[in-house]
Image (spheres, rainbow, N blue to C red):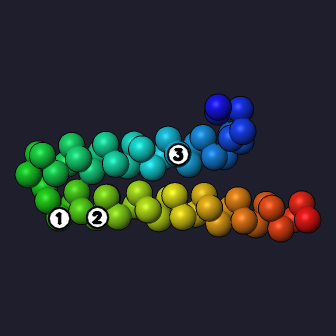
């Protein structure tokens, strides 16, 4: 299943996942504002990955 993903895809997924985990840990430690700030990174990282995929697919066409 993961053979379809490039190294860049895997790294961005790991970065988004780690950001989510770090945000949850920060939230449960009581730092709610910081947790929300870090939690906003997750969709940003994933959307950046989608952007890279789109740019890569237009170069291959």
- 5 relative position to 27: left or right: right
Rendering quarter of residue 2 = top right
Categorize mark 2 by other alpha carbons within 10 Å: few (<14), some (14-19), many (20+): few
Q: CA distance from mark 2 to mark 3?
A: 18 Å
Mark 1 → mark 3, Cα distance in angstroms? 24 Å
> Of the residues under marks 1 and 3, which one precedes in the sequence?
3
Q: Residue at x 63, y 46 (%)?
A: 9
**Residue 47 position within the rendered picture, expressed as x and y whole percent measured from the top left:** 54, 64
Q: Nearer the viewer, mark 1 or mark 3?
A: 3
* Left or right: 44, with 24 as reference point: right
Q: Quadrant of the N terminus?
A: top right
Rendering coords of residue 46 (x, y %): 52, 58
Q: State the residue position of label 2.
A: 37
Q: Residues within 10 Å of mark 1 (few under 14, many from 20)?
A: few
The disc at residue 13 is 3
Q: Is residue 57 left or right of residue 35?
A: right
């Amino acid at each position: 299943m993961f053979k379809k993903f490039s190294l860049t895809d895997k790294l961005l997924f790991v970065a988004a996942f780690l950001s989510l985990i770090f945000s949850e840990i920060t939230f449960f430690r009581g730092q709610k504002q910081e947790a929300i700030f870090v939690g906003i990174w997750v969709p940003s990282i994933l959307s950046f990955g989608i952007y890279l995929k789109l740019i890569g697919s237009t170069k291959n066409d």
